[in-house]
Image (spheres, rainbow, N blue to C red):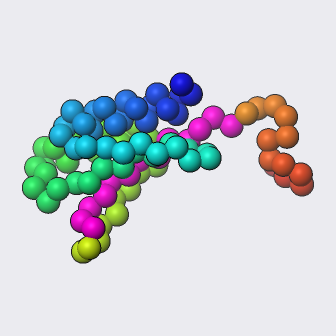
Amino acid sequence: MPASGVTAAAIAARLSAIGLPTRVKEHTRFTTVETEVPDTLSAESWREVLDVVAGADRFGLLATSLNGRTLWAAVRKTVPTTGDVGGPGYQR
């Protein structure tokens, strides 16, 4: 399993241990972990959740009146260091 998958799985496991069911999704450049956050989550649990997602490259909270609150964390996948990484015309 790539390092991003290991990190995402660890984040998902820690969030699940807090009592938040997770979804892990693979994308081209990153792996995401998502969970619905209940309104009843205590301040102590929020601190624990923030400690968990701090291990990701990016994280955020999407809150809507229709769908509640979705916490997400994204872990970048490693980019190959050889070959035609950027494609034709790619400039560094």
The percent position of residue 67, horizontal first and vertical second, equals: 27, 67
Taking the image as shown, residue 18 lies to the left or right of residue 62, namely: left
Examine the residues drawn in magenta and state their main secondary structure: strand
- What is the residue that sits farthest to the bottom in this orientation? 65
* Residue 77 in which image quadrant: top right
Front one among 40 and 48: 40
State how many labels appear.
0
Whether residue 91 is visible to the viewer of this picture, yes or no, is no
Q: Is residue 39 magenta?
A: no
Taking the image as shown, residue 23 lies to the left or right of residue 45, namely: right
* Residue 81 in which image quadrant: top right
The percent position of residue 58, horizontal first and vertical second, equals: 46, 49
The percent position of residue 85, horizontal first and vertical second, equals: 79, 41
The span shown in magenta is 67-79
- What is the residue that sits farthest to the top in this orientation? 1
Q: Is residue 78 magenta?
A: yes
Residue found at x 68% / y 37% = 79
Whether residue 4 is visible to the viewer of this picture, yes or no, is yes
Residue found at x 30% / y 50% = 35
- The quarter of the rendered structure image containing the N terminus is top right
Residue found at x 81% / y 31% = 82
The percent position of residue 51, horizontal first and vertical second, equals: 29, 39
Residue found at x 16% / y 43% = 45
Up the image or down, 65 lies above or below 71; here it is: below
